[in-house]
Amino acid sequence: MRRLVDGEKSVKIHGQWVPVAARIERIDSMSAHADADEIMRWLRGYKSAPRQTFIVHGEPSAQDALRARIEAELKWSCSTPEYMVSVEL
């Protein structure tokens, strides 16, 4: 089975093939349970800020705290989208 992270160029959604127009990144060096300091250290490694950063994992209070920290320290646009919200990239 090919996955987006393996370079798949399209995905089947509701029975229709949709082209992938995104760069997929895989982070093997970090635990899924990294703490905020580890996440901030990793984010600081980017050469430039992404247009938008989405916080989609964790409890709402932790998401909001990380969002606020990213905005304050890195000055990045950051959000914590609600469940089932669609975002056009």
Image (tube, helix red, strand yellow):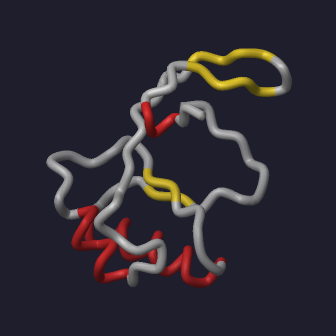
Q: For this rendering, which residue is in front, 75 or 52? A: 52
Which residue in the rendered view is the most extreme toward the right? 14
Q: Is residue 2 above or below residue 49?
A: above
| Residue under the image location 58 percent in, 16 percent down | 19
Left or right side of 68 for 85: right
| Residue under the image location 15 percent in, 48 percent down | 47
Quarter assignment of residue 50: top left
Q: Position of residue 88 (x, y in %)?
A: 61, 31
Circle count = 0
Q: For this rendering, which residue is in front, 87 or 12? A: 12
Classify the position of the N terminus by image quarter: top right
| Residue under the image location 64 percent in, 39 percent down | 87
Q: For this rendering, which residue is in front, 60 or 12? A: 12
Q: Is residue 75 above or below residue 16?
A: below
Q: Position of residue 61 (x, y in %)?
A: 61, 83
Q: Is residue 44 above or below residue 33?
A: above
Quarter assignment of residue 5: top left
Q: Position of residue 3 (x, y in %)?
A: 54, 36
